[in-house]
Image: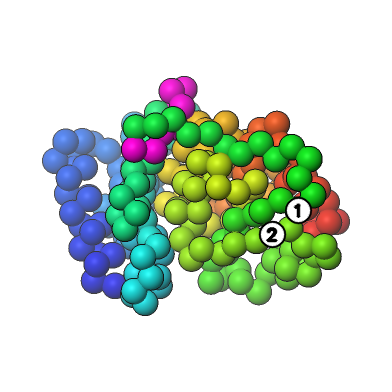
Amino acid sequence: MTEVDIEAERRIREAIQRRFLDDAIVGEEGGGNKHAQEEGITWYVDPLDGTSNYAAGLPLFAVSLAYADAAGVQGAAIALPMSHELFYATRGEGAFRNGARISMRKSGDKKKPLFLVSYAHAVQHDERISRFLALRPRPGMRVLGSTVAALCWLAAGAADGGLFFGQHAWDYAGGAFIAQEAGGRVETISGDPLTLPLDQDVAIAEAESFQIIEAVKSRIFS
């Protein structure tokens, strides 16, 4: 955590509260409410995802906002400041980057798909991750240091699938929703629906190409 994380969340929280006084806010840095409310709207805020990248001077980090009601996420917006990209989606209306519609990549018959992978520090020694890294032949893999950015670029077709281990609600709420609106199938790695605000292991691929996820899961979770 840096001072920028804390200040960014404070400003975002204040902006939300000025217009939506009754809404709950679940933020990474503990701002606002700490828990989602059962009725009404809850916002999920990640003010600076990729803090380690930011602190090291690597220009790969993101700011994520999503709002949800009892039926799930209804809208999200994610900014990648250094690449001047704004991703956003509203339920049932598709996903967009800087005004242009985006869609997930269809894998087809690719022999070596590319996966975007992320895992929280708390689960980095999880046996499932070790099994994934030990796969032979192993799918192509990129670890970007920002789950939020990875989810956005996955939604825009930059990779075939994504596995995200040990993610908090603010990590995946906005990006997973944008990927879903871009044509993705989104669920937990165990095959269950995502349930906010629980910590989750998230699996994502284009809906018709989700067999690439199933093939990997069959080898690392058997």
Viewer-side residue, 31 vs 148? 148
Element carrying mark 2: strand
Amino acid type at mark 2: Gly
Q: Which residue corresponds to mark 2?
A: 140
**Marks 1 and 2, how far apart at CA:** 6 Å
Q: The magenta stretch spans which residues?
A: 91-98
Is the magenta region chiefly helix, strand or loop? loop
User: Measured from the top left, where is residue 34 in percent x and y?
Assistant: 35, 54
Which residue is found at the position 62% from the left and 44% from the top? 204
Q: Earlier in the sequence, mark 1 or mark 2?
A: 1
Q: Quadrant of residue 106?
A: top right
The N terminus sits in image quarter: bottom left
Mark 1 and mark 2 residues within 8 Å of each other at the beta carbon: yes
Q: Position of residue 183 (x, y in %)?
A: 57, 31
Q: Residue furthest bottom?
A: 56
- How many marks the image carries: the answer is 2
Identified by mark 1, the residue type is Lys
Q: Would you say residue 96 sits in the magenta stretch?
A: yes
Q: Pointer 1: what residue?
A: 112
Q: Is residue 156 above or below residue 169?
A: above
